[in-house]
Image (spheres, rainbow, N blue to C red):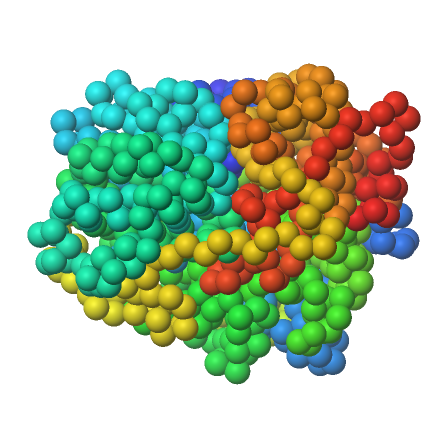
Amino acid sequence: MDVKFSSCYFCSSRGCAVKVYLEEGRIKRVAVDTGAPIVPGAHCVRPSLAGEYQEHPFRLDFPMKRTGGRGENKFTRISWDQALEEIAGKMVSLKNRYGAETIATSSGTGRGAWEFAKTRFMNLFGSPNRFGAVTVCYGPRIMVWLTTFGGALVSDRKKDLTRLVTLWGRNPHEGGPHTWSSFLKAKKEGISTMVVDSRFTEPARQADRWVPIRPGTDAALALGMMHIIIREGWHDAGFVKRFASGFEDLKERVRDYPPERVSAICGLSQDDLLDTARFFAVRQPSNITIGVASEHSPPNSIQAVRAINVLLSICGSVDTPGGMLIAGPSEDFVTDAAMELNSVLSPEQRAKQIGAGKFRFLSYPGWELVEEQVRKKFGENHPAGVYLTCMAHAPSVFRAMLTGDPYPVRGLFVSGSNPLLSHGNTKLVYDALMSLDLLVTLDLTWTPTAMISDYVLPAAGWLERPDMGNFCSIGAYPLVQLGEAALPDSVKGRYERYDDYRFWRELGCRLGQEEQWPQETFEKVWEYRMAGIFRKRKVKTVGEFVRQQRWEQGSVEPGRCAEGLATPSKKIEIKSVIFKTLGYDPLPSYTEPDPPEGKWKKYHLLNLSGVRTMPYHHSEYRHLEGFRRIHPDPIVEIPVDTARRHLIADGDWVWIETPVGRCRQKARLVTTLPPDCISTQHGWWFPEMPAKAPSLFGLWESNINVTTDDDPEKCDPISGGWPFKGQYMRCRIRKVQRGGGDMEKKGKDEG
């Protein structure tokens, strides 16, 4: 039996180490490589289903070209050469007519360390319009860390030193085995635990303290805690004086957040707020893991992430043993930023990035200010890769497709994403994609988005490519962990798949970019990026490296503050120079969301959408029978008393409705939510339903984004993040009656 040392990408950007056992070229079993540093840490069911995934007939095997109308499910098989030649020709035609910026790309969560290749291609082509999920997932966190600390924060949990572990808007029990394992270990080590979450999740049940705030009020809670902590003198005055800038201004700011105001905003009693502030302040140093809840809650998405990090800072838990340390890239490793060729995109083209004028933080204006600082500290191998920190504004790009404002966007490449499921306002996204002159999808399986594409191209999965986790490849911390391909990406007569690097390289070569793609294969890319490490280890190939030891780990040590940080002041920036330069409030703040207007006044419940659910990852794996047996139906959680008022019983199918559209999910009655909230699952479609439009694999049936609003005026004013939680997620519910209608058609028409 052959054993391969691979990087699992069944979920997020970590790239967990696994061993793949093969027999006659087929998967026998997959096991976690427990000796490696990046592993699930707790039981994860996903790797056990790798064999079913790899062999499933829903996988894309060969390039396909649309021969009928969009959504008619009429495709013909073509060669890779024909696909690439035709796509390149159409791109040249569109560029000549509208300019390079007419081409955009869509990305999802980190699906591999090839993302730099997409950015490199777009920079060379001349378009600034890359957009994706990072605007509302991790992008805000890494950019706040870079502007505040000059690097990413990593936990330094130590048994006899760390006194508190906090999960803030994060439920790793369903969406992060590694973080969940760390949380449980902290409990066993006697470390106190706290969970800030509107839902009474499993982590909340097990925590020493649960803080059940009103959705979207994270920033107010952090500011209110700082008011109390500073008033009572519980902050680390010596640390703040020596290593932070802007503390005196913060003292003035938090006077606007006294307990009586904050308790009303957050839905807590003043006693609970005081106890929470005390509980946190006296248990330092501490670790905090921030989830997506705050990132999903405009208009306070960015300010909430800032406020939480500033709270941690004034308590002296940054750059402190047992607290949070400031990390940087590995030595002798070429980071994503150095691979992206960002310098070749001209200032004139950068200025055309859609949404960058209004949402300046997670776009070129913000990235250029951050990049200037980190380049001084780390050189070209810095951690500010643009694919995580600098995106076009997706809702505005979709509108440009429809209206031509500020200019026409006529072509879109979709890779590692599924826009019809992952973005808000599905009906608008659908209309936008249907209007395009060129829509290309590079993916692992058929999807609703693929079904309306002009070209559908088969991507190599994690079993078929050498890869590492995105956090490693971007240089967020000094650890690189590599995996090799377990299986070939092409088998004659069975399938012909390209890894993403090969796709972007070969397309680029057809557009005159040959000299800028010197590494012919993804494996050669890793040999180049890790050349210094390979020399030290006296290895030459990926295979030799992973068999000797698949990782190289440097240390993250306290003391970065004393050296001077990669920020304008060289200190922790409580008051951010970069925010001020961009025209934003340089101090953390809380803005009350606008009250509902017009039709929205009739919708009184709040929808906490996008909660993570095992075994799925966003919109992936609904086609796998093994996964569907574990979790067969989309679930809406409804408080028991709320359900009774609506005559809804456990197991009933329920309409979730907004002025934007409606979908249905199956009711689960709970006592873990506030009475004015429901919680819905995202990413649901039904591969067993008809592929042809209007069904598109049941796209309109239970996809919660049929109901969500991505109006740019409701997006976060700093990042442009659209609402998936918080006060802009109003809805109503009612029981689906027998003969409830053809959802495939109604969902679309009513959207």
Question: Could you tell me how many numbered marks the image carries?
Answer: 0
Task: Please tell me which residue is depicted at 72% across the width and 33% down the height of the picture.
Answer: 733
Q: Could you say which is closer to the camera, residue 445 or residue 327?
A: 327
Q: Is residue 664 above or below residue 228?
A: above
Residue at image position (40%, 72%) is 582
Would you say 629 lies left or right of 380 here? right
Report whether residue 630 is seen. Answer: yes
Which is more toward the observer, 139 or 740? 740
Q: Residue at x 76, y 66 (%)?
A: 402
In the foreground, 535 or 223: 223
Left or right: where 280 falls relative to 459: left
Tell me if I can see residue 447 in this picture. Answer: no
Q: Position of residue 345 (x, y in %)?
A: 50, 75
Q: Position of residue 255 (x, y in %)?
A: 28, 55
Residue 714, image x, y percentages: 59, 57
- The image position of residue 676, as x and y in percent, is 59, 33
Toward the viewer: 355 or 252? 252
736 w.r.t. 420: above or below: above
Q: Residue at x 47, y 33 (%)?
A: 198
